[in-house]
């Protein structure tokens, strides 16, 4: 939680999960990259479905980098099968272009480990949409983060929220961070709903990827978190105008400030000691921002 704000550099806005005509997206890779650039994003990662019917794409977005805009290569990986009997959906950001296709016997957790060993940042995709169970989260031991919000899952099924799944994992002792993503397919207004703000000295794909691995980011649908610092037994948060600033932790534990146009709050850490907490901001439009967890 704190490292993202104490690390040197500035925040860069990016989408980590999206599709193009290289799999089941409606528009081509160049158009998809341009759409993010034109919407004010600093970077994007096209994560087309790494499936045989699409010939296992790691979509090459390098030609679409430009001054002030970059891309990371990645894919959404699939293998049989979760506890509910459907294919895994595993987000791998930062894959090499020649990442080998899965073998017939490779499981989801094995595939995720291989992606991580190849340098990728690995996240659990849309857990609520696919009704992932706690044992799935435990099995996917290469995962570094959970999609706390997936915009396409929200638009298509009203199951965009991954916070309950994330908290279940945290309370089982897993150390997972939180990302918000679009999972854009360019259908039904499924873009520009959730993103990450990654702290890095430079807008360089390798630097961004290193920052993702280090947890130097927060997730948002709109609100900006300017700083989170620990001051003795309190957490101090400053942000864009919010109507709620909340620390949430194990079971019913929380600390919170409510008001109009709040731009800072100091919240006690006492009740989270020995466990975990994470910060959530809500603005007047109901849009949220999420910090990574802290283990005080
Ligand atoms: Zn998916
Ligand atoms: Zn997807």
Image (cartoon, rainbow, N blue to C red):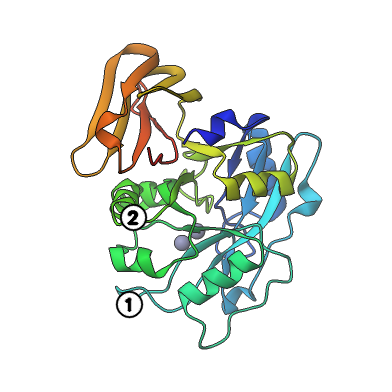
Residue sitting at x 35%, y 24%? 233
Q: Nearer the viewer, residue 137 or 32?
A: 137
- The residue tagged 1 is 85
Residue sitting at x 73%, y 66%? 97
Q: Nearer the viewer, residue 185 or 97?
A: 97
**Is disc 2's CB within 8 Å of ligand 1?**
no
Q: Nearer the viewer, residue 264 or 17?
A: 264
- The residue tagged 2 is 173
Drawn side of residue 69 relative to residue 122, left or right: right
**Is disc 1's CB within 8 Å of ligand 1?**
no
Residue sitting at x 81%, y 52%? 63
Q: Position of residue 20 (x, y in %)?
A: 61, 57
Q: Position of residue 221 (x, y in %)?
A: 45, 34
Against 104, residue 201 (above or below) is above
- Mark 1 or mark 2: which is in front? 2
User: Which mark, by number, is residue 157?
Assistant: none
């Amino acid at each position: 939680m704190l490292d993202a704000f104490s690390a040197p550099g500035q925040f860069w806005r990016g989408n980590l999960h999206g599709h193009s005509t290289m799999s089941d997206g409606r528009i081509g890779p160049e158009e998809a990259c341009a759409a993010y650039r034109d919407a004010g994003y600093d970077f994007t990662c096209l994560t087309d479905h790494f499936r045989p019917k699409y010939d296992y794409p790691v979509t090459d977005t390098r030609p679409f980098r430009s001054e002030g805009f970059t891309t990371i290569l990645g894919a959404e990986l699939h293998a049989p099968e979760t506890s509910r009997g459907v294919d895994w959906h595993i987000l791998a950001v930062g894959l090499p272009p020649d990442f080998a296709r899965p073998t017939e016997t490779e499981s989801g957790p094995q595939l995720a480990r291989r992606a991580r060993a190849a340098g990728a940042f690995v996240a659990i995709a849309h857990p609520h949409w696919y009704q992932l169970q706690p044992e799935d989260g435990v099995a996917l031991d290469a995962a570094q983060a959970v999609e706390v919000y997936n915009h396409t899952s929200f638009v298509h099924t009203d199951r965009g929220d991954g916070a309950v799944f994330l908290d279940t994992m945290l309370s089982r002792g897993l150390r997972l961070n939180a990302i918000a993503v679009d999972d854009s397919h360019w259908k039904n207004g499924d873009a520009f709903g959730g993103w990450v703000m990654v702290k890095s000295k430079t807008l360089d794909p390798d630097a961004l990827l290193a920052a993702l691995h280090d947890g130097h980011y927060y997730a948002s649908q709109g609100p900006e978190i300017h700083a989170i610092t620990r001051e003795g037994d309190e957490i101090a948060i400053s942000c864009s105008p919010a109507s709620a600033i909340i620390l949430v932790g194990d079971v019913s534990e929380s600390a919170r400030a409510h008001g109009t146009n709040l731009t800072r709050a100091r919240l006690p850490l006492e009740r989270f000691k020995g466990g975990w907490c994470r910060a959530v901001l809500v603005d007047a439009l109901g849009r949220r921002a999420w910090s990574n967890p802290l283990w005080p």
